Amino acid sequence: MSDRWRWEYDPDRAHVADGLPPRVVHEVERLADHPAVRRTVTGTAPSADGKRAHRADMPVEDFEELAARAPETVWLEFLDGRLLVKPPSDGAHGELLREMTGLFLDLSPDLWLYPWRGLRLGDSRLRPDGTLAPRRHFRGAGEWAAPAGALLTLDVVAAPSPARIRAHAAARLPLHLLVERERRTLTVCAEPHDDGYRGVTTRPLGVPAELPAPLGLSLDTVTLAALTPPAPPASPAPPAPAS
């Protein structure tokens, strides 16, 4: 790996898919040596989890060129000048997205939850796990589409990223949903402003979630709760050896 770039998080630690496959790690590290990255790394900045990661104040046009060169196994994102890699989905993550797609389809057959649709959110380029929009809304759009007309975005996360939430709010996406697998909660973010969402409501999975305008719907989350079983209780500590 180049000493001018480092991972936003440790690719060998459990994340969405219990660590990234070696081939994906290799491809991202190869892309890190692309001239668009090498010439724009200017220093280090703390990431959302407190770790330090190189900050690349690259022009967004350079990022789009870089993302277009990436193989299909690597999804790059761009947030606050930082180059990110979106981890692959594991089985539980994919099942949650499938269930959410079915829930919205039952509520309104004219809408579709587009998975991992690239969006232009100001100077950021992100791929939410789901973007709810009218069917055929993104027809003719390129890799990065304008968010206008989308009704909500959805991310299934281990922990929320304040920077990602702010990017969605600043782009005036009406609603942003967060499913936290470990906490087993659904958070509805509404009333977008430049600095974030003013209306934030968190409910445990299994309890109906009210989605305000522009949807004005109640989302039944019982099936989501069934896909996120509680963590098993911690094993008791072994007895101390006799002295």
Image (cartoon, rainbow, N blue to C red):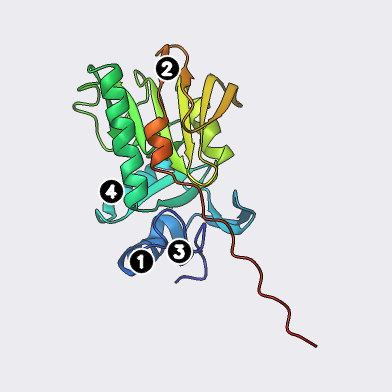
- Please give the name of the residue rendered at 31% of the width and 35% of the height, measured from the top-left corner: 99
Please provide percent x and percent y for residue 206: 46, 31
Please tell me which of labels 2 and 3 falls first in the chain.
Answer: 3
The kind of residue tagged 4 is: Ala
* Residue 97 image-quadrant placement: top left
Few, some or many C-alpha atoms within 10 Å of disc 4 (few <14, some 14-19, many ≥20)?
Answer: few
Please tell me which of labels 4 and 1 falls first in the chain.
Answer: 1
Q: Are marks 1 and 2 in contact (CB under 8 Å)?
A: no
Secondary structure category for the residue under label 2: strand
Please provide percent x and percent y for residue 55: 55, 53
Residue 94 is left or right of residue 37, and the answer is: left
Tag in front: 4 or 2 = 2
| Distance between the alpha carbons at the discs numbered 4 and 1 | 14 Å
Secondary structure category for the residue under label 4: helix
Few, some or many C-alpha atoms within 10 Å of disc 3 (few <14, some 14-19, many ≥20)?
Answer: some
Mark number displayed over residue 218: 2
Would you place residue 221 above or below residue 21 in this image? Answer: above
Residue on which disc 1 sits: 30
| Distance between the alpha carbons at the discs numbered 2 and 3 | 37 Å
The answer to whether residue 144 of the structure is visible from this angle is: no
The answer to whether residue 53 of the structure is visible from this angle is: yes
Is residue 27 or residue 90 the one in the foreground?
90
Q: Quadrant of the N terminus?
A: bottom left
Tag in front: 1 or 2 = 2
Please tell me which of labels 4 and 2 falls first in the chain.
Answer: 4
Residue on which disc 4 sits: 68
Residue on which disc 3 sits: 11
Is residue 39 or residue 199 the one in the foreground?
199
Please tell me which of labels 1 and 2 falls first in the chain.
Answer: 1
